[in-house]
Image (cartoon, rainbow, N blue to C red):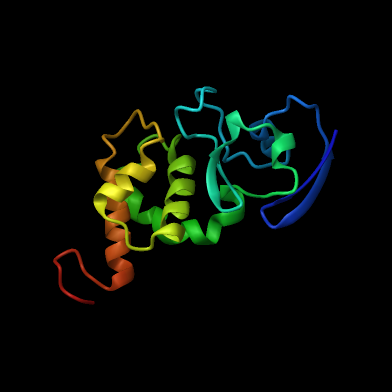
Amino acid sequence: MEIKLTLNGKAVAAAVEPDLLLLDFVRAQGCYSVKRGCETANCGLCTVLMDGKPVLSCSVLAARASGHEIWTLEGLQEEAEEFVGFIADQGAEQCGFCNPGFVMNTIALLRENPEPSDEEIKAFLSGNLCRCSGYEGQLRGIRAYLDWKKGVREDGTGL
């Protein structure tokens, strides 16, 4: 079957098997940030944005993505670059395997809610499995980034 979609801002048309997962499709297109983890929609490693909303590409058929806009980390480097250093500064990227999923969900969160509370951040990122950290580093990194965007130093004073 033929599908047509927009992947990272570029029109893509391809013949696919009806049972091809979106995960496998985007990886075949060179988007290797999308990772295969649990294959049960529990870890968040395969997160992509479909029409701006995070979806788990291991549980979506490529055919269902036809006509939609799909973004992977490869297409969102500039947007991600601004805050990933804050996460790294908190020691939250120990092995780095879960980072693309966290980054994709953080982008979606901040687009939807530019000033989330800590509870909203935790709720939005709860679908991401990280085996190295206790998730507090990611939370601290996102909070530090948001504070930086507001012009607040770590000591609470303005810049």
Image location of residue 16, percent across then percent down: 81, 32
- Residue 93 spot, x, y in % from top left: 37, 41
Q: Position of residue 58 (x, y in %)?
A: 59, 29
Given residues 155 and 40, the one toward you in this image is: 40
Q: Residue at x 25, y 42 (%)?
A: 136
Classify 95 as above or below 8: above
The answer to whether any part of residue 82 appears in the image is yes
Please give left or right for residue 113 compared with residue 73 in the image: left
The residue sitting at 26% across, 55% down in the picture is: 117
Q: Does residue 105 appear left or right of residue 25 in this picture? A: left
Q: Residue furthest bottom?
A: 159
| Residue located 27% across and 73% down the image | 151
Q: Residue at x 31, y 57 (%)?
A: 116
| Residue 90 can be seen in this image | no
Image vertical order of residue 29 relative to residue 148, above or below: above
Q: Quadrant of residue 75?
A: bottom right
Instruction: Indicate the quadrant where residue 156 lies.
Output: bottom left
